[in-house]
Image (cartoon, grey):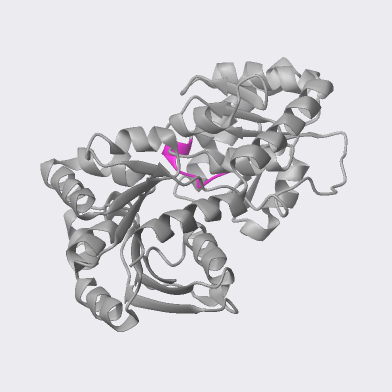
Amino acid sequence: MRIFILSEIISIHTRRWVTSLCQRGHTVFLFGLLKSDVTPYDGIPNLTIYSCGYSLDEISRRRQWINGKIQYLGGLSAAKRKIKEFKPDILHAHYASSYGLIGALAGFHPFIVSVWGSDVYEYPNAGTVYRRLLQYTFKKADTILSTSHCMAAETRKYTDKDISITPFGVDTKRFAPQPVSKSDQFVIGNVKTLRHVYGIDLLIKAFAELCSMAPDRNLLLKIAGTGPQWQELQTLCNTLGISNKVQFLGYIPNEQLPTLYSSFDVSVSLSRRESFGVVAVEAMACECPVVASAADGFKEVVADGETGFIVPVEDSHSAALALQKLVSDESLRISMGRAGRQRVLRLYDWERNVDTMEGIYSRYAK
């Protein structure tokens, strides 16, 4: 099958879909707008990559305001030209508010749109124009895909079309418990971009409270990721007097994450909003119990009381209490870790997720 994908080239999510499809023998054309490093795609068979080479600032790229949209639409003519040359069986746009709009205007069918999160949670709330553009994109789509049921419910506010669930799971052969040397330190970990929406500040406050609850335990907090709150979060650690117990690891390549998760005793994610809890799925695959906020995406993937604990959003105190339970009960950590991996094997195995995507393609392909 010949598949034309409109998506951000640098995204690990894009790379995983493209890699798996190519390895299964499909011919893929990946079209991106932003100037991107394509070396991570080296050696992937059956793949052509084209980038418009645009460079957008953070506000334009993430918040999707009008000035960003104008630059996005500047790639429409290039997209139409490449679609005509490639002659695909399927046009698939990832992220409805940018690449989805280009796909809708390109006029090619069958046209599939995948929603990713902020394109349905934030974008249509920015104003009437944005909401109508999103509705137009969905109107032009032959079908719509969502990685989670909760995000599908949000999407249904703007369309009456059927929405298929295509979970973004993990490679359970790679994301599995890894041999790591353990010390007497109890390691609490987080893997996420350092942005307000992901609640790293709440995690730091919960950790500080836990340190007061368990002064005799050798506690360590590892925070993996980069982002605009880097300095602010380090200042918060200083203010709370826990800087000597917190490590900011910076960017960790996806290939190293299984070992990192395996080094955690507990993985904590206190996002204020989450469309699909992929970090929780990754941690559970590595038999790491999870404490997560009651954001929609986490409620869907974490079995509360079985694979971890779900705590209220914006509630660092409840998170500290949940952590205290896990710190004091090794058998609970072990049982939750094992149950988490079984849940991932049952629901979020990547190969099954790709099977689902291929099945959708087959239904709509010319």
Given residues 165 and 200, the one toward you in this image is: 165
- The quadrant in which the N terminus is found is bottom left
Question: In the displayed structure, would residue 183 be above or below residue 255?
Answer: above
Q: Can residue 222 be seen from the camera position used here? A: no
x%, y% of residue 96? 29, 52
191 horizontally vs 49: left or right:
right
Q: Determine the image quadrant of residue 239.
A: top right
State the residue in front, 94 or 250. 94
Q: Is residue 79 above or below residue 315?
A: below
Question: Which residue is painted at 21% across and 53% down in the image?
Answer: 137
Q: Does the stretch in magenta take in 1? A: no
Total labels: the figure holds 0
Residue 59, position as x, y percentages in the image: 29, 53
Q: Position of residue 25 (x, y in %)?
A: 55, 73
Quarter of the image for residue 209 reads: top right
Is any atom of residue 276 visible in this view? yes
Chain part drawn in magenta? 191-198
Where does the C terminus fall, quadrant-wise? bottom left
Q: Residue furthest bottom?
A: 85
- Relative to 85, say whether 302 is above or below: above
Q: Nearer the viewer, residue 248 or 135?
A: 135
* x and y, in percent, of residue 27 in the image: 47, 75
81 sits left or right of 95 in the view: left
Q: Is 148 displayed left or right of 343 in the figure? A: left
The quadrant where residue 141 appears: bottom left
Q: Residue at x 51, y 30 (%)?
A: 300
